[in-house]
């Protein structure tokens, strides 16, 4: 808020009410509200789509639970227990009602609540993604600054080649090559790990190869994007010229002024990409036998376990939608041009 | 989407291009040569791969890619008759690469083409007309983007028989929203241009404006995006085959070859490495070719 406005505010009591009106009507808050509202139909759509798709899969869950020798009476009884004797819309409604109360239902396969299943498998996946994100972001930012220092220089060309590799390699191929090199040839890391254990060091060792398989493509995207953004800032923006004219050292201009402003773009990309990360988890976790929700999703689909699949899909969709929201909020809250309502689209 | 989407299409563009040197004719020549190479090396690799997959088997007879003799199992590379060797079932590895490559080409190109046409039209209409139709379409696209692709692909594999054509339809469900989002974004920019306003004021019909004025201006961006898209689809197709839910054994596919090789990774890493390297070359050529096209057309 400009100083003149503050001075006026202290003089004029009516201006205080005006401020309240301005905050509640601020473009940033309205934007946040609008985003929250549009997130609801998206989440509903995703859960409904999952319900429809899973219902199309042939095979009776009761028969899967009881085995081939079950009598029709037993099947009907289990159908009743699982609520499968209700029509489609009733079942969706009951499930949705449970979701709003924080209850994701009972998994068909092990008759445990989906909540406890998720509580069991979610931490592994979270640690894995956190590891991959932190390392790829750290390396990506460092390499981007090195490359942007001299566009088309040696560091830039090298990092371009490395990131081209990262953008073109399939994660499952990378995982197998890493296993072959680091677990078979030189035995630094385990190839499979059924649990993370309680020792943080063993957990880090177990997660390193899967995190690298997920993180390397990310590193490629992040470093290239950030580099392009920094180079653009260094060439176009007035405050860079000012900083240089002030006589600041080149590295200081690069690190403090250009990179800091480019972080906006990077954080937006990270937030928007959260959803796709989860797809990678579903392929990488089974390769390393990691007990996370990605591996759990694959096995749940294979045994037609609708409540478990729904529970995991809801988590995925929530993360995706939250990522989009965070990206929007970052702009709304941090970018002064949107905060003051000059451009909200 | 209110946030300025990071411009994914400029990820690899080298950014500041050095100005054509006016002083040194030799440097200018070198720059031109580098530009030509950046275009023709990936293009040549793609043509070579296409030739290997579709034309080679018609000229030279190669062993079948789905069956082999158990007597000729696990032959090392450069054995007579099997220059890349055979797998544990005695199937010729080069033949599997060729027939698996046909699948990769067909799935990659058709999924992208379907996404480009349907998604492009949806994106054009949503971006140009705006209003409530745009809101509804954008929400539908958000739903599809938040929906894990694997669930649908797995379900399609279980409900319909897993086959190449079903795989194409299942993957198209995800290429359509991607293309419509990109097309909508660039349509929004083009819509504000003075020549569109002029066309509108002169009474040109909306569909004519879209097809004659908007479309030609968004096409370069869509085509370069589609080259990246083919790479993504080929990797995804491999992932589905890798999980055993796409092309069914014994029909060969690169993903299935890699999955099969995983079981003998310690003893014979070449079963994983050979298809992996071909997959990498394919996707990388597509990415580099997309970059070169972007440079030629000046697409940002």
Image: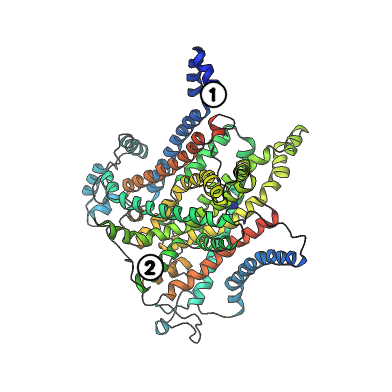
Alpha carbon separation for disc pair 2 and 1: 61 Å
- In the rendered structure, the answer to whether residue A91 lies left or right of residue A321 reads left
Q: At numbered mark 1, what does the secondary structure look like: helix, strand or loop? A: helix
Q: Quadrant of the C terminus of chain A?
A: top right
Give the mark nearest the N terminus, 2 or 1.
Answer: 1
Instruction: Give the crowd class for mark 1: few <14, some 14-19, many >=20 residues within 10 Å.
Output: few
Q: Label 2 belongs to which residue? A: A179
In the rendered image, residue B220, in percent from the top left (x then y), is placed at 67, 52
In the rendered image, residue B205, in percent from the top left (x then y), is placed at 73, 36
Q: At numbered mark 2, what does the secondary structure look like: helix, strand or loop? A: helix
Which picture quadrant has residue A240?
Answer: top right
- In the rendered structure, the answer to whether residue A1 lies left or right of residue A209 reads right
| Up-down relation of residue A86 to residue A13 (above or below) | below
- In the rendered structure, the answer to whether residue B253 lies left or right of residue B185 reads left
Which picture quadrant has residue B35?
Answer: bottom right
Instruction: Give the crowd class for mark 2: few <14, some 14-19, many >=20 residues within 10 Å.
Output: many
Q: Are marks 2 and 1 in contact (CB under 8 Å)?
A: no
Can residue A107 be seen here?
A: no
User: Which residue is painted at 56% across and 66% down in the image?
Assistant: B282
User: Which residue is painted at 49% across and 31% down in the image?
Assistant: A34
Q: Label 1 belongs to which residue? A: A3
In the rendered image, residue B88, in percent from the top left (x then y), is placed at 39, 78
The subunit carrying tag 2 is A
Q: Residue furthest top?
A: A13
Q: Nearer the viewer, residue B78 or A245?
A: A245
């Amino acid at each position: 808020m400009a100083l003149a406005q503050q001075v006026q505010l202290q003089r004029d009591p009516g201006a205080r009410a005006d401020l309240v009106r301005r905050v509640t009507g601020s473009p940033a808050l309205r934007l946040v509200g609008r985003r929250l509202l549009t997130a609801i139909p998206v989440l509903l759509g995703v859960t409904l789509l999952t319900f429809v798709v899973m219902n199309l899969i042939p095979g009776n869950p009761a028969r899967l639970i009881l085995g081939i020798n079950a009598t029709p009476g037993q099947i009907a009884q289990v159908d009743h227990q699982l609520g499968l004797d209700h029509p489609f819309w009733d079942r969706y409604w009951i499930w949705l009602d449970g979701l709003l109360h924080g209850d994701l239902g009972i998994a068909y396969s092990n008759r445990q609540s989906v909540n406890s299943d998720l509580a069991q498998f979610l931490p592994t996946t979270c640690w894995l993604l956190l590891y991959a994100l932190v390392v790829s972001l750290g390396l990506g930012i460092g390499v981007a600054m090195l490359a942007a220092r001299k566009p088309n220089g040696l560091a830039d060309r090298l990092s371009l080649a490395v990131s081209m590799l990262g953008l073109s390699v399939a994660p499952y191929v990378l995982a197998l090559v890493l296993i072959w090199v680091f677990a078979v040839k030189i035995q630094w890391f385990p190839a499979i790990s059924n649990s993370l254990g309680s020792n943080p060091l063993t957990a880090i060792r177990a997660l390193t190869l899967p995190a690298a398989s997920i993180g390397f493509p990310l590193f490629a995207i992040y470093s290239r994007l950030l580099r392009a953004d920094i180079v653009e800032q260094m060439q176009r923006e007035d405050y860079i010229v000012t900083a240089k004219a002030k006589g600041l050292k080149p590295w200081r201009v690069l690190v403090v002024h250009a990179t800091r402003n480019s972080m906006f773009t990077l954080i937006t990309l990270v937030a928007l990409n959260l959803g796709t990360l989860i797809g990678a988890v579903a392929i990488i976790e089974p390769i390393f036998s990691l007990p996370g929700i990605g591996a759990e999703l694959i096995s749940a689909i294979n045994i037609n376990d609708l409540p478990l699949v729904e529970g995991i899909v809801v988590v995925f969709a929530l993360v995706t939608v939250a990522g989009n929201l965070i990206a929007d909020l970052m702009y709304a809250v941090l970018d002064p041009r949107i905060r003051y309502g000059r451009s909200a689209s | 989407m209110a946030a300025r989407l990071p411009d994914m299409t400029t990820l690899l563009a080298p950014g500041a291009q050095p100005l054509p040197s006016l002083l040194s004719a030799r440097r200018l020549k070198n720059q031109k040569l580098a530009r030509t190479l950046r275009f023709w090396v990936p293009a040549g690799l793609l043509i070579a791969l296409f030739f290997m997959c579709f034309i080679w088997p018609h000229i030279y007879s190669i062993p079948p890619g789905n069956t082999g003799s158990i007597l000729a199992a696990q032959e090392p590379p450069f054995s007579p008759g099997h220059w890349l060797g055979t797998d544990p079932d005695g199937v010729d590895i080069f033949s599997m690469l060729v027939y698996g490559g046909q699948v990769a080409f067909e799935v990659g190109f058709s999924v992208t083409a379907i996404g480009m046409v349907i998604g492009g039209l949806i994106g054009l209409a949503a971006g140009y007309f705006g209003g409530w139709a745009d809101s509804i379409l954008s929400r539908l696209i958000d739903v599809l983007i938040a929906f894990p692709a694997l669930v649908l692909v797995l379900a399609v594999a279980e409900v319909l028989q897993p086959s190449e054509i079903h795989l194409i339809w299942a993957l198209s469900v995800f290429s359509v929203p991607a293309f419509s989002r990109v097309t909508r974004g660039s349509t929004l920019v083009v819509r504000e241009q003075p020549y569109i306003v002029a066309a509108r004021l002169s009474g040109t019909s909306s569909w004519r404006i879209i097809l004659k004025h908007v479309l030609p201006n968004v096409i370069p961006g869509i085509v370069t995006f589609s080259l990246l898209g083919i790479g993504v689809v080929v990797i995804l197709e491999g992932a589905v085959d890798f999980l055993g839910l796409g092309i069914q054994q014994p029909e060969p596919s690169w993903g299935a070859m890699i999955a099969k090789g995983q079981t003998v990774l310690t003893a014979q890493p070449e079963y994983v490495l050979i298809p992996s390297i071909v997959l990498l070359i394919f996707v990388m050529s597509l990415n580099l070719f997309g970059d070169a096209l972007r440079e030629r057309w000046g697409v940002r």
